[in-house]
Structure formats: C-alpha cells, structure tokens
Amino acid sequence: MGVLLKSFPRQVTFQELNASSALNNAIRHYQFGAVAAFAALHLAVLAVFFVRFRWQYLGLMLAMYVLRMFGVTAGYHRYFSHRSYKLNRFFQFAMAVLAQSSGQKSVLWWAAHHRVHHRHSDQLPDVHSPGLRGFWWAHAGWVISNDYDEYDPGLIRDFGKFPELRWLDRYHWVPTVLLGAAIYLVGGLGAFLWGYVLSTVLLYHATFCINSLAHVWGTRRFDTADESRNNFVLAVITLGEGWHNNHHRFMHACRQGILWWELDLTYYGLRVLNWLGIAHELRGVHLPHCEAEAGT
Ligand SMILES: [Zn+2]
Ligand SMILES: [Zn+2]
C-alpha cells in the first residue's frame, strides 16, 4: 500500500479549517416541509412490522436497493458528476431516470453539488464536510435543510444543455413517485413498504454515509488534501463507493477499487454494460502512472 502513497501539499490544515468553522455554522435553514417528509418516510418504515412477512418482500427490497444503488453510483456519481464513461443520449436519459428513482433529486442538482464537494473538499465551501460542519449536517442535514435547494447551473453546463434532463430537473420527483406507485399497484401494501419505503430509506443512508462516514472512518492510501477514507464496509453497502480516498485521488476514474480485493460492484456492472455496447470509454486508474508518481 505504501508504494502508492504520495504526499500532496495541503493548502491548509484540517485543524485550521476547524478553527474557522464557526463562520460556517451561523445560519441553517430548515423548512417544515422537507423535514416532515423526511421524518414521515422514516416513520413509515416501521409499518413493515404490521404487514405479514414474506420472503418475496425481502427479495424485492434487496433488488430495488441494488438496482437503484447502481443508479446512484453509476449514474449520479460516476457518469453525471465525473463523466468517467460515456453513454448515448437514450441511455443517458435512462440512467438519469434510474438514478432519480432513488429520490435523491435531479441528476443536475446532485452532480452540481458533488462537483463543489470535489473542488473544495473539507474546505469552507464544501456542502458536506463532517470535520467542518458536523456529522449530522454532512450526513443528512444539508439535504433536508433548504440551504442547498438551488444549484449553480454553470457547474453542470455539460448536461444542463439537454432539455430532457432539464425536464427531469424540474419534475425530479416523477421517477421515484412512478416507481412507488407501480410497486403498490402490482404488489400491494406489503411490497410497497418493503420494496419502496424501506429500500429508499436504506439507500438514503448508505449514500449519505459516503458524505459523512467516508470522510471520518477508514484508512488513507493517498495523502489527499481532504479527509477522505477507504472503507470496506462502506464499499459493500454502496457497491464500491467506499474506496473514497482512492476516488478523491482519481476522481475521473470509473473504477474506485484499485486493488483486486477492493470490491467495486458498480465498476463490474459498468464493465458488463461496456461489453453489451451500452457504456463506452471507461476511464481507469493507471497504476504504473500512479506508482511512478509515488517515486517507486
Ligand atoms: Zn468526498
Ligand atoms: Zn465524486
């Protein structure tokens, strides 16, 4: 592991940033609507105890989780935020719909804020730095507050030029509502509670863990100018996003698990899509180049 380590000059130390975080904690806007919806969805999870358990429900929950987590990682993150591979316009739209079926707002909103995170990781403009603004804020607070309802379209011009993505931005709730309604109509209340409500809440928290825990808990292979970590547990529950320190070092790489044992199911899925002729030009991590940087 050591051979891959490279020291990068820090622009400012984490402690220095912490010292100035009071500035950033001044005002946080939570509106009742966003908080109530978030709380109601969590309360609705408890209803799974009031429907008779069926293994099919558990299977549906897992399938909806894995499929939509792929939409989050391969869609919101690796495609729309980092352009780490290419899709044609039809599959680009399909990927956006799949991502938004997870209920994490539009791909334009998600990617624009994520680009800010990489530009200013663990520095004051970062929308979700647990070291600077607290764990809860980094995990969920910034999403359910109304401070970041808007985004700078200038940060996502490359995708904002497509009218179908702007439509999905305006009506960002459509894919997730349609999915929930379809599951209810086909499978009834039990299927809805397990396959939609529970899997959506688990998806939220697994995704949020990358913004919170993956900057706190784990190991650091690369001495990046932020607090990103690699974490196997997070990599399992997020289909590969737990290799977050690798990702901060190689943010445009489609592959986040670098070593053979660094499980990265999203990357394997994208390799399959590449083989099927759907995803093209997957950008990789060039280990020889990386080791040369480390002076080995
Ligand atoms: Zn990060
Ligand atoms: Zn990223």
Image (spheres, grey):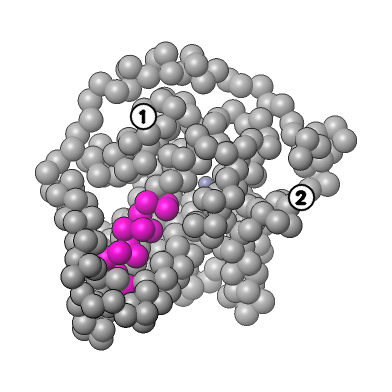
Query: Can you give x and y, in whole percent of width and height, for residue 251 in the image?
Result: 60, 45
Q: Residues within 10 Å of mark 2 (few under 14, many from 20)?
A: few
Q: Earlier in the sequence, mark 1 or mark 2?
A: 1
Which amino acid type is marked by label 1? Answer: Gly
Residue 254 placement: quadrant: bottom right
Left or right for 73, reference 283: left
Residue 187 sits above or below residue 228 on the image: below
Q: Which residues are magenta?
A: 195-207
Residue 137 location (% of width, % of height): 32, 35
Residue ID at (12%, 44%): 32
Residue 278 appears left or right of 1 = left
Q: Locate the C terminus by quadrant.
A: top right
Q: Position of residue 175 (x, y in %)?
A: 30, 69
Q: Amino acid at mark 2?
A: His
Check residue 20 in the rendering and tell me which mark sits there, or answer none: none
Residue sitting at the far right: 296
The residue that mark 1 highlights is 134
Does the magenta segment cover residue 24? no
Label 2: which residue?
286
Kindly identify the residue that appears in the image at 36 percent across and 29 percent down.
Answer: 134
Q: Quadrant of residue 194?
A: bottom left
Q: Quadrant of the N terminus?
A: top right
